[in-house]
Image (cartoon, coloured by chain):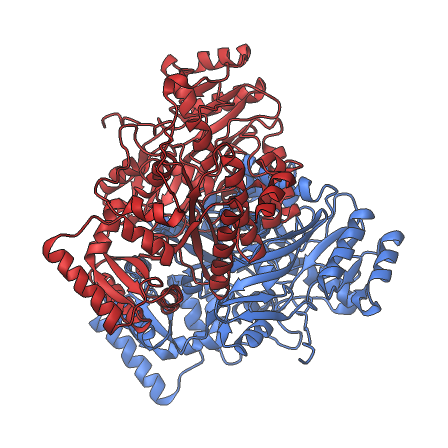
Chain colours: A red, B blue
Amino acid sequence: MAEYQVRHMKWWGWGDEEVTFSDVDKPKLWPYLRGELGLDEDCITPPVSFEEIKLPPVKVNEPFVSVLKTALQDDQLSAGKKDRLIHSAGKAFRDLLRLRNGQVDSAPDLIVYPSSEDDVVAIIKAANQHNAVVIPFGGGTNIAGCLEPKDRDGRFIVSMDMCRMNRVLNVDKKSLVARIQPGVYGPHMEEQLEAEGVTLGHFPDSFVHSTLGGWVATRSAGMQSDKYGKIEDMVIALRMVTPSGTIVTRTVPNTSNGIDVRSLCIGSEGILGVITELTMQVHRLPEFKMFEGWLFPDFEKGVRAIHECMRLGVMPVITRLNDPGKTALSAAFKKPDSGLKATIGGLMKWYLRSVKGFDFSQSCMMTTAYEGDYDTFHMQRRESAYIFRKHGGVCLGEGPGKSFQEAKYDFPHVRDYLMDRGVMGDVSETSTTWDNLLNLYTKTLANIDRAIRDTGVDPWVGCHISHNYHTGASLYFTFGCRKIEGKELEQYLYIKKAAEDSFMQNGGTLSHHHAVGTEHLPWIEEDISPVGVKAVESLKSGLDPKGVMNPGKIIPGPNPLQEWGLNNEVIKSFERAD
Amino acid sequence: MAEYQVRHMKWWGWGDEEVTFSDVDKPKLWPYLRGELGLDEDCITPPVSFEEIKLPPVKVNEPFVSVLKTALQDDQLSAGKKDRLIHSAGKAFRDLLRLRNGQVDSAPDLIVYPSSEDDVVAIIKAANQHNAVVIPFGGGTNIAGCLEPKDRDGRFIVSMDMCRMNRVLNVDKKSLVARIQPGVYGPHMEEQLEAEGVTLGHFPDSFVHSTLGGWVATRSAGMQSDKYGKIEDMVIALRMVTPSGTIVTRTVPNTSNGIDVRSLCIGSEGILGVITELTMQVHRLPEFKMFEGWLFPDFEKGVRAIHECMRLGVMPVITRLNDPGKTALSAAFKKPDSGLKATIGGLMKWYLRSVKGFDFSQSCMMTTAYEGDYDTFHMQRRESAYIFRKHGGVCLGEGPGKSFQEAKYDFPHVRDYLMDRGVMGDVSETSTTWDNLLNLYTKTLANIDRAIRDTGVDPWVGCHISHNYHTGASLYFTFGCRKIEGKELEQYLYIKKAAEDSFMQNGGTLSHHHAVGTEHLPWIEEDISPVGVKAVESLKSGLDPKGVMNPGKIIPGPNPLQEWGLNNEVIKSFERAD
């Protein structure tokens, strides 16, 4: 098989270096945002150039580096500026802000590219022996600070980029399990699986640029999770190299062998070790697949419709419901219709407003997808359509579905687009039970809105639902506002805190699928309880007694909020402004 | 609500004290077993009487007991003989053997009956302070040694019987989650849930006598797991009191909050703490429900039929497939037919043999159940029947289904029946992928058969499949043979070892739903790897640094096989006999 060419993302933002999100074919987008955010005049705030970036000097740990040089090939080690820069951060808002400003306070001292489990063992053994820090790196897409190359003790840091371990090793088509190396990127993995007629069914927004190992280490969710589950539901067995040796679990569908050590590795965010192999549940490729758009009179009716589909066991494989804010934003993304299409669009609007009584300021767009064999596919569509209509939904046909399908991996680009224009934008997501969903939605929307206004600017806030369960669903909030020059980070953290506080106070969780990393550290004790944190610490100190694996993640320090970047003075300065 | 009267099982075997399994209406049973096991003459080997039992003296830990006496009511403490005896063991074969022989080497020194989480906290705090051992006790049904009241250091032992914490505290009918106390027995829990129109859907063979907390602590599976999942799939949130404090997780359908601490508590078999509250996913009661029997020409065809149902997403809620051995045993359980029924039975047999070409020495009985609303129920039945027929299955109607339904919780009684008659019988179960299922089945059947013959007696071995997954299924082996007077334990362990070794060597796991306890300790390192065991040890030493919680379970000692009771000499003595 031809060697797969790994392409790292651009160092200052999302996506391939030569790809830029453009609004040329979206004439409504900027006017919409300008209006919502009360921007009087455009300002252009591009990132600094690569040449302007100054990285911190490489630290010295001769004994460690010399072991690595013996154990690995020359091309498996790199301390080049571009490599260090790319591996110095994930894609959290904080990361982008710092990178765009050329403010790179910490960067790994060396990048290593293992190509086998033996390499991984050699690197971790050497790090443990010579007290160097190892940070596993998948695609670098994490937005919770999981890749932050910081160490309290100022030790030498290697970023372990897993991209060369990118093979689907084996597919058992009868049992539908596949042994896969963790460094494989989404598209490359699906390509190899597709050749065997199967799919993992995991398509997170980051799919193009993230890796299987990263998904498992952060408990990722893909847009078809309603059918295929979250990534943790798909892991049948794994191998994880820790400083104390390698954890190996058996390829069995289920077991009662005490505490499930497989589940200790899932979501461990690199703090215990590096996953070197995953045996995943896979599925036969569906025969039929289709995307469709629906419009609901309001958010509550859309939520009710999804819940009823779930209750009756007739869920489409995607039901992604936008609230009114997100619906308006989506509409602003649209290419202009011309000729007949525009006429039909106009007639449709007239019909919805006049005949169906839609209030467009409240209406909510839902994207759905159906897949399966002939029977399943048609049953899903027929039964869910019946329920959607019962709750006031109107089918918009395949058009909006197609638009979603074409643009589904583009959304993370928008943050860069906004940051180029003096605007900050980010996301916070959670989950809760059905009974509490609208309560948590309403309160969090209001809390984020209020927090942004506290900082003295106009808010834009929206939300969508995209992962549904028997007992509840996720809520994914997106927010944006004009940034306050020179105080961007404090402003951002103040708003982010409002969202996370709201999750904690109103029955949510700190994140449904973005991990803890450093960005959610202030809430981890409240989320899993102090003794829950102690359990995680016990694992950490037992398997990684010297603390060489990805320090500073999941387990909070003594003053998490201050270490995160907020103190009471800053908080009060905004509250006073209210 | 009226106080629920807890009834402990008889101390010497399965079930209520006044219930004895009888073969009066099963005239074929004993002749069948006698023939299979080559028993020339009947021998009667009843258990010793209660009066004959001598318990070890109560140990002394005055400071501890005095704290308990202050913290709890008088009726929450017991050191009575009957209470100590009941709490001195679970229902493993080893337990029954010792109890029936009156050989009670270890027993708890005190039984405590907490009625609130505060009680549990007080007890564990006192135990930790005064170095006493706490063993959580649910219904006492565990067959893997999870309740073994032994301590390497000879400390004072309390058995913490959770039976007074038996309330369904709250049912959220919209989100379908219920907050439930862990000490509730199966029937009492379902009764309380049913009053709210919901069910947990968890019906293990031990249902009548086991508790929710016990199911979660041991990763139990119910007979409808194909629809409702294993118990770990149903836990939404929990509270667990450890010597380091209380772990509390949030009631959310899913999360990405680092390592899932909820899953650290599930399957922890009491070695970290005591579960004091569970928030469980529940389901609306099904409108329709039906049991049915099917006969397949052989085991492989039955397996293929189940696998195809799974692949096509048309699983009944139960598909329990017996192999030829288990099928013959089931037939021996039958009440004699008379009159018209006997004539029809005879005709059916003639039809199957002569027209369908069935070889009854190879044919396999499958019990199925269907449930749901009208559409789901009929779809399940229609679609699965089509697949069963395609693989040579013949529908036997509701009769055999009804027999199964009536007797479904009786099977564990049979061990006592056998032990009364000089026969030993036990079970060992595992799971594997579809691709490996028949291989593991064939090899394990042969290995158990060979091991029994090694001990110089005739074997009976059978197997059934009752838990199915996308990627594989469980295999549940039952075996029996004449016991060798005076060498029963060694003989049993030698046979049990053959089963477990076979699971390890042929791609299984040490247990699919019976836990590790003490009985599976010799295989835990091979099952979850030595570093996996180290992970569990890390949790144990972090949360329970003094080792007061249920010592000796899950984590093996230095010589697990010897501690289990087998040494090379014994093994060779049997192998030589071959």
Q: Looking at the image, can residue B455 be seen?
A: no
Left or right of A478 on screen, residue A315 = left
Estimate the x, y position of residue A555 in percent, counting from the top left. 60, 38
Q: Which quarter of the figure is the N terminus of chain A placed in?
A: top left
Observer-nearest residue: B247 or A241? B247
Left or right of B355 on screen, residue B479 = right
Q: Residue at x 19, y 65 (%)?
A: A348
Give the quadrant of residue B343: bottom left
Estimate the x, y position of residue A37 in percent, counting from the top left. 40, 47
Q: Residue at x 31, y 80 (%)?
A: B346
Left or right of B54 on screen, residue A320 = left
Q: Please tell me whether residue B444 is drawn above or below residue B384 in the rendered image.
A: above
Q: Please tell me whether residue B123 is drawn above or below residue A243 in the rendered image.
A: below
Left or right of B86 on screen, residue B307 = left
Estimate the x, y position of residue B192 in percent, counting from the top left. 58, 75
Q: Residue at x 50, y 17 (%)?
A: A56
Q: Residue at x 52, y 54 (%)?
A: A447
Observer-nearest residue: B199 or B570? B199
Give the quadrant of residue B384: bottom left
Residue furthest out toward the bottom: B339
